[in-house]
Image (cartoon, rainbow, N blue to C red):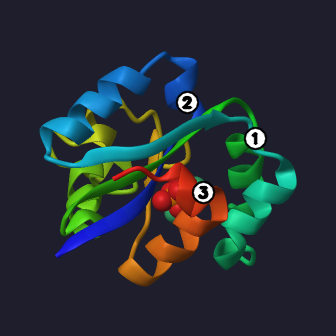
Amino acid sequence: AIERTLSIIKPDATRRNLTGKINAVIEEAGLRVVAQKRVRLTREQAEGFYAVHKERSFFGELVDFMVSGPVVVQVLEGENAVAKYREVMGATNPANADEGTIRKLFAESIEANSVHGSDSLENAAIEVAYFFAQTEIVG
Ligand code: CMP
């Protein structure tokens, strides 16, 4: 089925001017960017977005990192988009990521791993709504 998923191009990637190169990998995989904006997350926004990880040891560092520079939040659309984008991103830890994936190509570390993608269709809907109004998504 045609799905939508939330993507975030993270501060390590915007800092290195990789937005276009990452979008090229996304588009070559057959996903369409149907909404996109470059924003500086507030601490409150980053904490809210990653609330499921609140109890994890890396939560504080994760939030610090996500507010350390601009991010590009995107809605990606396509056949099986949630799982497709997770394939295109590669493993969370770039050391384990397959050849040709965004994280293998560009990520610096498990934290500075260049991109985020929703992990389920249910979370995709929640995460898309966290950043975008329906009127901002143009399929
Ligand atoms: P993301 O898909 O954005 O969701 C949570 C993020 O936490 C994850 O990508 C990683 O970038 C980050 N993170 C930082 N440290 C760790 C860790 N030790 N294990 C898992 N995720 C981590």
Which residue type does callout 3 highlight?
Phe
Residue 20: x, y in percent? 36, 22
Cα distance between the residues tagged 1 and 3:
18 Å
Residue 59: x, y in percent? 72, 63
Give residue 19's mark.
none
Image-based side of 63 in relation to 89, left or right: right
From this viewpoint, is residue 113 visible?
A: no
Image-based side of 73 in relation to 107, left or right: right
Mark closer to the chain start, 2 or 3: 2
Which residue is drawn at the image coordinates 33% and 53% (left, top)?
Answer: 139
Residue under label 3: 132
Q: Give the answer, above or below, for where 54 lies relative to 23.
A: below
Q: Nearer the viewer, residue 95 or 48?
A: 48
Which residue is drawn at the image coordinates 29% and 60% (left, top)?
Answer: 86
SS label for mark 2: helix
Q: Quadrant of residue 64?
A: top right
SS label for mark 3: loop
Q: Quadrant of residue 117?
A: bottom left
> What is the tally of numbered marks visible in this picture?
3
Q: Residues within 10 Å of mark 3 (few under 14, many from 20)?
A: some
Residue under label 2: 12
Which residue type does callout 1 highlight?
Val
Q: Give the answer, above or below, for where 123 lies relative to 24.
A: below
Mark closer to the chain start, 1 or 3: 1
Q: Quadrant of ligand 1?
A: bottom right
Give residue 67's mark.
1
Which residue type does callout 2 highlight?
Asp
Ligand 1 under 8 Å from disc 3 Cβ? no
Q: Nearer the viewer, residue 60 or 7?
A: 7
Q: Residues within 10 Å of mark 1 (few under 14, many from 20)?
A: many
Which residue is drawn at the image coordinates 46% and 46% (left, top)?
Answer: 35
